[in-house]
Image (cartoon, grey):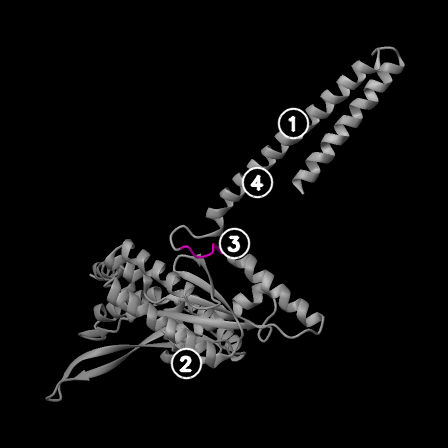
């Protein structure tokens, strides 16, 4: 195509000069056919060399442009597709699915899987970023060996995979094999025994959604559910997750307000020694919602842990227990601390600060 354009440019340039020379001859500016032929030949030669020059420049620009795009298309660390390249590929595949539907052609099916490394922050903090990088590199390497998997890095330890089909059992078996191979490679070949696995959420097109934004949202809902109930495994989206997620978001919003409005209560359960004497009290958290009434801890503590509100909630419990100790309501008290609070390195400093303030 570029050679054709060069030839056309050369001919056009030659014809332009012919017209100029003809006009010049007509008005007596150029004398004789010999001068005309010489000028015409020189014109075509100049046009040819100019076209070759432009063609070479264009080719060089194209190569440079292609080279500059390569680092953008692939993640530097892992070799997975970059976020932008993966989302482009997802949109292209979904467009094909929609086109097939609109033309009543044989249906095309696609599953999007979101992969999240379990306890990746603790792995990084405890064993160094080089260990975390090894995990991510091996995660992608193992995914690239699976037939038909297209993997991209969306950011941090978040990865996404596109794979044809939506059959749950078949995909489940493939994912189980992938997780086993990944764990084996990290434990045996790299000696990373601290790696605990990955959690995967999946949604399919067109069964669940046909557009990228919606499909990503549904796969994320499945991942959210998987972190709660199926950590280390594969969870497929189902419509009930929408209601569960909506309820959890509402509870999380209400929890933030409840901390500010002091809607929580501490109930003290006696702890008795073996000989039957009162030894201490255990502080039990209760939430008196203005509309829903008393909400059991098992309905809001997991949501507080998932949403990050548990840190503020834990601080509130400790401060209230200290206030009740100072007032003489109780002599000694045991305060429960959520496992999620230990994930934050500031927990010891937070406890020390609250105890100093309570003196």
Between 115 and 89, the one nearer to me in the picture: 89
Marks 3 and 4: CB-CB under 8 Å?
no
- Name the residue carrying label 1: 49
Residue 159 is at least partly visible in this image? yes
Q: Within the magenta stretch, is there residue 341?
A: no
Between 312 and 192, the one nearer to me in the picture: 192
Q: CA distance from mark 2 to mark 3?
A: 47 Å
Q: Residue at x 44, y 76 (%)?
A: 235
Q: CA distance from mark 4 to mark 2?
A: 67 Å
Q: Within the magenta stretch, is there residue 81?
A: yes
Q: Of marks 1 and 4, which one's residue comes earlier in the chain? A: 1
Give x and y (percent) for residue 164: 53, 71
- Label 1 or label 3, whichever lies nearer to me, is 1
- Label 3 or label 4, whichever lies nearer to me, is 4
- Name the residue carrying label 4: 62
**Up-down relation of residue 12 to residue 111 (above or below):** above
Numbered tag placed on residue 34 in the rendering: none
Give x and y (percent) for residue 21: 82, 18
- Name the residue carrying label 3: 84
Q: CA distance from mark 3 to mark 4?
A: 21 Å
Q: Residue at x 38, y 81 (%)?
A: 296
**Up-down relation of residue 328 to residue 10 (above or below):** below
- Name the residue carrying label 2: 294
- Label 4 or label 2, whichever lies nearer to me, is 4
Q: Which residues are magenta?
A: 79-84
């Amino acid at each position: 195509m570029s050679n054709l354009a060069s030839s056309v440019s050369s001919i056009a340039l030659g014809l332009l000069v012919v017209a100029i020379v003809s006009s010049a001859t007509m008005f007596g500016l150029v004398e004789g056919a010999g001068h005309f032929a010489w000028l015409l030949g020189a014109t075509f030669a100049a046009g040819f060399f100019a076209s070759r020059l432009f063609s070479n420049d264009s080719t060089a620009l194209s190569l440079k442009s292609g080279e500059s795009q390569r680092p953008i298309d692939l993640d530097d660390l892992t070799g997975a597709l970059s976020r932008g390249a993966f989302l482009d590929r997802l949109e292209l595949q979904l467009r094909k699915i929609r086109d097939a539907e609109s033309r009543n052609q044989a249906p095309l099916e696609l599953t999007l899987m979101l992969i999240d490394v379990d306890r990746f922050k603790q792995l990084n903090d405890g064993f160094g970023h080089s260990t975390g990088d090894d995990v991510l590199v091996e995660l992608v390497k193992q995914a690239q060996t699976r037939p038909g998997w297209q993997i991209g890095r969306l950011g941090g330890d978040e990865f996404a995979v596109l794979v044809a089909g939506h059959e749950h059992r078949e995909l489940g078996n493939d994912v189980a094999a992938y997780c086993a191979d990944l764990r084996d490679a990290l434990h045996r070949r790299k000696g990373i025994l601290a790696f605990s696995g990955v959690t995967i959420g999946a949604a399919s097109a067109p069964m669940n959604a046909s557009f990228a934004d919606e499909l990503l949202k549904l796969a994320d809902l499945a991942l959210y559910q998987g972190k709660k109930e199926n950590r280390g495994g594969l969870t497929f989206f189902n419509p009930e997750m929408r209601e569960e997620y909506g309820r959890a978001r509402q509870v999380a919003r209400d929890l933030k307000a409840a901390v500010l409005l002091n809607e929580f209560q501490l109930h003290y359960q006696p702890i008795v020694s073996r000989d039957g004497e009162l030894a201490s009290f255990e502080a039990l958290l209760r939430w008196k919602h203005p509309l829903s009434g008393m909400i059991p801890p098992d309905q809001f503590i997991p949501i507080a842990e998932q949403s990050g509100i548990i840190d503020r909630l834990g601080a509130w419990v400790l401060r209230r227990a200290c206030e009740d100790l100072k007032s003489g309501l109780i002599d000694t008290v045991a305060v429960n601390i959520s496992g999620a609070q230990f994930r934050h390195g500031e927990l010891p400093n937070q406890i020390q600060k609250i105890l100093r303030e309570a003196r």
